[in-house]
Amino acid sequence: MRKKYLIAGLLFIFVVSLGLSYFTVNEYLRRCRMKVMKINLERAYTLFNRGGYIFLDVREADELRKRGTIPGAKHIPRGLLEFRIGRITGNNLNTPIIVFSNGEKRSTLAAFTLSVTLGYRKVYRLDHGYEGWKRKGYPTTLSPSNKAKTTPSKIIIRKKIFKKR
């Protein structure tokens, strides 16, 4: 009988401790934002024109095709960031990177991963994201002056081949 109460008590403590450490996605994003540097659109545009910064688009490839991107931006989907970032930076942790997505959620998580988890020292999250960039009228791959550049650099689209059984 005592074993049942002991097991039930330990199970209760375990469940309560899980509940105390749990937080929502929005809370996690808030915590990540506190550890990530952001850059406003005007400053980012100045750095875009000056050069020397990698603009990193972490959206999915179909989003880039439909909505365009910042000219010259590199593309790594958020889910593959840890695996592919070294190809772009040469594993140089001092590479200056401005990360963006449509808004701010994926770019916040990507910037957090790059700076806190992987140790990159010059990572910024674009405030208001790509949508803010477009609203300001800054150049995109879909801008009239960039019609020839309808696809961002470094995007590889692979066709899936299914075998018939």
Image: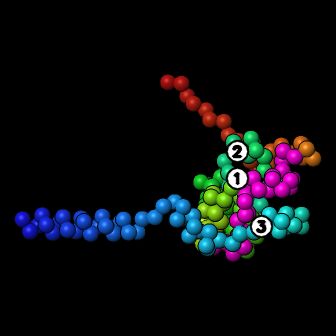
The quadrant in which residue 87 appears is bottom right
Amino acid type of the residue tagged 3 in the rendering: Asn
The answer to whether 59 appears left or right of 3 in the picture is right
Amino acid type of the residue tagged 1 in the rendering: Asn
What's the residue at 83%, 68% (across, down)?
43
- Dot 2 or dot 1, earlier in sequence: 2
Q: Which of 37 and 82 is in front in this view?
A: 37
User: What residue occupies the far top of the structure in this picture?
Assistant: 165
Q: How far apart are marks 2 and 1 (CA)?
A: 9 Å
Name the mark nearer the viewer: 2 or 3: 3
Decide: few, some or many residues near mark 3? Use Cα within 10 Å; few <14, some 14-19, many ≥20.
Answer: some
Q: Nearer the viewer, residue 63 or 92?
A: 63
The quadrant in which residue 46 appears is bottom right
Magenta segment boundaries in residue numbering: 119-143
Decide: few, some or many residues near mark 1? Use Cα within 10 Å; few <14, some 14-19, many ≥20.
Answer: many
Percent of width and height locating residue 120: 67, 72
The answer to whether 3 appears left or right of 162 in the picture is left
Q: Which of 131 and 35 is in front in this view?
A: 131
Q: Which mark is residue 102?
A: 1
What's the residue at 38%, 69% (across, down)?
20
* Residue 61 visible in the displayed image: yes
The quadrant in which residue 107 appears is bottom right
Helix, strand or loop status at disc 2:
helix
Q: How far apart are marks 3 and 1 (CA)?
A: 15 Å
Circle 2/circle 1 CB separation < 8 Å: yes
Decide: few, some or many residues near mark 2? Use Cα within 10 Å; few <14, some 14-19, many ≥20.
Answer: few
The residue at which mark 2 appears reads as 63
Percent of width and height locating residue 71: 84, 53
The residue at which mark 3 appears reads as 40
Helix, strand or loop status at disc 1:
loop
The colour scheme used here is rainbow
